Amino acid sequence: MNRFDECVNVVVGFEGGYVNNKDDKGGETNYGITAATLESAKTKGWVSDNVSIKNLKLSHAKVIYKNGYWNAVKADDLPYPLDLIMFDMAVNHGVNTAIKLLQKSLNSILGFDLVIDGIIGSKTITAINKLTNTGHLRCLCAYVLLNRTELYTSIIQSNKTQERFFKGWITNRVVKLKQEAGL
């Protein structure tokens, strides 16, 4: 099994199958794929037009995950377990937000001066490599998860209707992801 497939298995375990919770801002989802993301994937030719959110198969979700999230955060270029953490955050928060959390964490740890732009470019990769080469990757991963917890808190502070999801976000996303990552 390749690294992408290993990480997909973890993320699918968090996301589950079809859900249509009226209080969830993501709306109707399947395998964590929103209806809007599915429509975008159809437009890009990643899945056929006859796929609906309700009949979305894991094979469809994997194509969307690979093209829309894994590749977008350059997970193949990231060290283990940062690849899993970034992939999961991209699926859950969007690619741009996931990368910004990473960049914020890199800036905080060793005083990097990255522009927090949501793009993994050469400077972000260089900063990650520097931390990895100095043995601080584990610290970076923990810091990213801490920043993620703060993001969940800010979501609730700005919209109290999302508070009902907090325990699940922390228990089922942050804590389990920390365990899956071996941190």
Image (cartoon, rainbow, N blue to C red):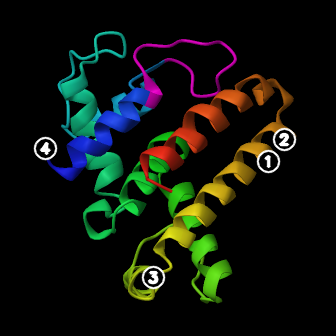
Disc 2 and disc 1: Cα gap in Å?
A: 6 Å
Q: Residue at x 63, y 33 (%)?
A: 171
Disc 2 and disc 4: Cα gap in Å?
A: 41 Å
Q: Is residue 8 above or below residue 83?
A: above
- Residue tagged by mark 1? 154
Q: Earlier in the sequence, mark 3 or mark 2?
A: 3
**The image quarter in which residue 15 lies:** top left
Say which mark, if any, is on residue 133: none
Asked which secondary structure carries label 3, the reply is loop
- Residue tagged by mark 2? 158
Disc 3 and disc 4: Cα gap in Å?
A: 27 Å
Say which mark, if any, is on residue 1: 4
Q: Count residues near mark 1 (Cα–Cα under 10 Å), then give few for <14, some for 14-19, many for 20+.
A: few
Query: Which dot, 2 or 1, sits closer to the camera?
Result: 1
Q: Residue at x 76, y 22 (%)?
A: 164
Drawn side of residue 182 relative to residue 74, left or right: right
Q: Amino acid at mark 1?
A: Ser
- Residue tagged by mark 3? 135
Asked which secondary structure carries label 4, the reply is loop
Q: Earlier in the sequence, mark 3 or mark 4?
A: 4
Task: Report the quarter where the N terminus lies.
Answer: top left
Q: Count residues near mark 4 (Cα–Cα under 10 Å), then give few for <14, some for 14-19, many for 20+.
A: few
**Badges 2 and 1: C-beta atoms under 8 Å apart?**
yes
